[in-house]
Image: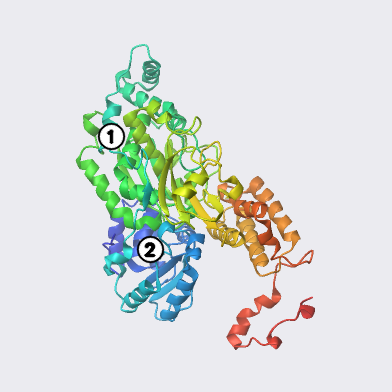
Amino acid sequence: MPQSNLSPELTTTGLTSLLDGQGRKPTRLLQILIEIQAAQHWISPENIDQLAAELNLPRARIEGVIGFYSFLHAEPAGQFRLLFSDNITDRMLGNQNLLEYLCNKLWLERGHVSEDGLVSVDTTSCTGLCDQGPAMLANGMAIPRLTRERLDEIAELVLQKVPVTQWPAELFVIENNIQRREILLANSMQPGDALRAAIAQVCVPGSAVEAAANQRSWREGIPSVALCAPVSTLEEIKRSNLRGRGGAGFTTGLKWEACRNAPGGEDNRTRYVVCNADEGEPGTFKDRVLLTTQADLLFEGMTLCAFAINAKQGFLYLRGEYRYLLEPLNAVLQRRRDANLLGANILGQAGFDFDIEIHLGAGAYVCGEESALIESLEGKRGIPRNRPPYPVTHGYLDKPTTVNNVETFCAAALVGLHGGDWYRGIGTAKSAGTKILSVSGDCARPGIYEYPFGVTVRQVLIDCGAENTLAVQVSGPSGVCIGADEFDRRIAFEDLATAGAFMVFDESRDMFEVARNFAHFFAHESCGFCTPCRVGTAMLKATMDKIAIGHGTQYDLAEIDQLNRILLQSAHCGLGHTACNPTLDTLKRFRPTYERRLKSLDFEPAFDLDGALATARRMTGRDDAGAHLSMEAES
């Protein structure tokens, strides 16, 4: 478990030391703030003043970064910050009752800090533990499989003021739950195998590879013999038809080639490789398992990419919810440096210099979008950029940058060792290779399943032990919800493209409540940059809540469709574009679950005046008829 080396009270001297350790770089601002937060549980005005002075940054910029990320606080949030995962699968497993139980144990109101400043309890978005929920974060450390007995133990540890780093290790045990393996999860590669295979490539006289190497040699002033192996590696990636595993499915080889061909600064060598390990999509947890079991394969794929595009620096952007993986991953990186698989002249290849740093996120779903992730890497708020230009030409620090996710880099390492033709022979004509699915919800065997592309939804349901299935949410809230009549559809880019989430709902579930949970998620995670998304997701949330309490009408259902059109046309990024998907999908396939909640009125105002007086009734202890507005009075 990672521990901060800072004292509980961060002095001016301590902060100066921290800044020195981070090189006093403004691009490291987020990492500095995360360290301060870990040390003293909040970021004080004095901390902000010192950071502004020593980093030569406007105070407003620092405050803006703190306010953007949900795991950073400019006000005391308690020595213990306990956040229950509030994904729909956690709700299905009873997280709300458990949250209330813990609040009662601690004599605490949800969302508030205890009077002694000791503890606060609230919710957060998906923690990547959908296969072993309900889950929580205790000062950023993940705890799965919550029960009342576990919460009793946690409450006692909090009341005794035992630091989280000293809590019993069994509380933090997280299972991998790998249920089905194919070429990736069952690989037997040794560290360096793919790199050795890539370096061994030679140019065949008269081949397209030699011609491409000669062309680059002329353009870049580098001997063609030094370019043959990188060109061959890039050609193998292109031949494999490997596509990005984040859901959009852009061809990986074309992305790498565009980055390789983009001007890279004065020496033409300033390019970056970035791994997106910020899987915040509810229902997705495959990266968690790959980072735990296949870290060498991931770093091999990143290094292979650097070899192909001529990059010298890489970054792994690790979501804040996976902070507990930071130390193990850094240990793997150090082991690779010691084996000359990172650093200078990798495997004795002159000029093959590359290393990787890990940057932590701090609780912002939108940073899963590649340009927002790059902004966060630069120490800023994770606001998605306007595109074009694209990261392959203007990415990190405005230099050519290749961004792929964890699964894509792992697959690239397999291609590097076995070749493009081998990889292309697996899966379907348009979807080469395998796909890892994060299966959760109403099934007997939740966990990680790897299949060749083309597997049917029905086969996955059989394998995971799902019965009486009503619906499956494929690719999380931003994906698609399908009913039983579509279970013969296939997981593939030409049918059901997915980033990996596969959430199962049986016939006991209310699909309106599923969609409502997702509406709350999008409203919470909107970065607020553009008005259509900021306002639109809030309106969608309010409309779903209005329907839930029995005040909705057919007019409201029609307004959801209109809201979707506005978001599609004018939202700044994909979060706004997909925010209405769960509601529209469930309306299309499970409309009765909406209609039975509707009133017969043609229109009803969204503002509930009587409901707004609920707080006053609680404060006065009154709930009699005289404390409520009658329908006649309201009208």
> Compared with residue 155, is residue 378 higher up or lower down, i.e. above or below?
above
Question: Which quadrant is the N terminus positioned in?
Answer: bottom left
Helix, strand or loop at label 2? It is: loop
Residue lying furthest left in this view?
338
Quarter that holds the C terminus: bottom right
Left or right, 545 with reference to 286: right
Q: Which residue is mark 2?
A: 144
Instruction: Say which of 440 and 63 sits in front.
Output: 440
Label 1's element?
A: loop
Q: Is residue 366 left or right of residue 569?
A: left
Q: Which residue is mark 1?
A: 353
Residue type at numbered disc 2: Pro
* C-alpha gap between disc 2 and disc 1: 40 Å
Count of numbered circles on the image: 2
Residue 140 point in image, percent of width and height: 37, 63
Q: Residues within 10 Å of mark 2 (few under 14, many from 20)?
A: many
Label number found at residue 401: none
Toward the viewer: 9 or 272?
Answer: 272
Residue located 63% across and 79% down the image: 614
The reply to whether residue 75 is visible in this rendering is yes
Residue type at mark 1 is Asp
For the question of whether residue 269 can be seen, the reply is no
Left or right, 134 with reference to 601: left
Furthest residue in direction top, as rendered: 206
* Quadrant assignment, res 127: bottom left
Location of residue 17 in the rendering, given as x and y in whole percent from the top left corner? 27, 59
